[in-house]
Amino acid sequence: MKTIEIKGSLRTDKGKTAAKTLRKQGMVPCILYGNKSENVDFAVPAVDLKGLIYTPNSYVVNIDIDGQKHTGIMREVQYHPVSDNILHIDFIKVDGSKPVTIDIPVAISGNSEGVKQGGKLQILNRKLKVSAMVDKLPDSLPIDITNLGLGKSIFVGELEYDDLTILTPKNSIVCAVKMTRAAMGAQAAAAAEAKKD
């Protein structure tokens, strides 16, 4: 899996007032926790987080906090309800000897049979939650839709990948080819032609 690096500084002052002050200075309050170790409160310049937040990719994050190196994954991001600015980020510490849980983007490939017949492809889950060892995490989960017919769906339960467990519910639909008026018209025309024969 891709890695990304961010640099932060330890937060000594905690609480809402301190967090507001940090945000006014263009910083985002963050916390790193997990693996039975002490929580680390730190702050990162908001501008340095764009590559981590505003992307479809998932990353293992190498975090440098005042020279102390940590490895984590992003667990939760809180946004301001009006401005959409980042208010707070939770990171979970990664232990190389234990599996981690992370959302990984799906990578759709192939030209679906259903789309060729006039259907419309719908992607309902752009990321799937998986559990795997850090060194086994892929950048994306490939899904070939070549044989996906009109009105058909691909469910999470149909997918299998080496070295990881999918945690998203098996009955969740990843993608589907929806019937359109054009496709219905083409089907009706084909049926009428078949009757003539």
Image: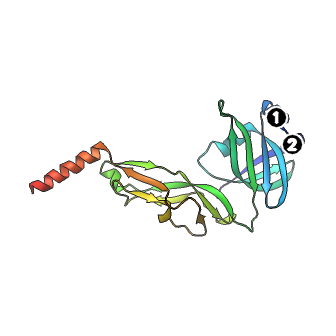
On the question of residue 148 being in view, the answer is: yes
Residue beneath the point at 68% across and 34% down: 80
The amino acid beneath tag 2 is: Arg
Q: Is mark 1 on a helix, strand or loop?
A: helix
Spot occupied by residue 192 in the image (x, y as percentages of width and height):
15, 51
Residue that carries the numbered disc 2 in the rendered image: 11
Q: Is mark 2 on a helix, strand or loop?
A: loop
User: Could you tell me which quadrant the N terminus lies in?
Assistant: bottom right
Instruction: Report which quarter residue 112 is drawn in.
Output: bottom left
Residue that carries the numbered disc 1 in the rendered image: 22
Q: Position of 180 compared to 82: left or right?
A: left
Residue at the far right: name it.
12
The amino acid beneath tag 1 is: Leu
On the question of residue 144 being in view, the answer is: no
Q: Which of marks 1 and 2 is nearer the N terminus?
A: 2
Q: Are marks 1 and 2 in contact (CB under 8 Å)?
A: yes
User: Residue 26, relative to residue 156: is it above or below?
Assistant: above
Residue beneath the point at 83% across and 32% down: 21
Density class for disc 1 (Cα within 10 Å; few <14, some 14-19, many ≥20) is some
Q: Position of 90 compared to 195: left or right?
A: right
Report the Cα–Cα distance between label 1 and label 2: 9 Å
Spot occupied by residue 82 in the image (x, y as percentages of width and height):
65, 30
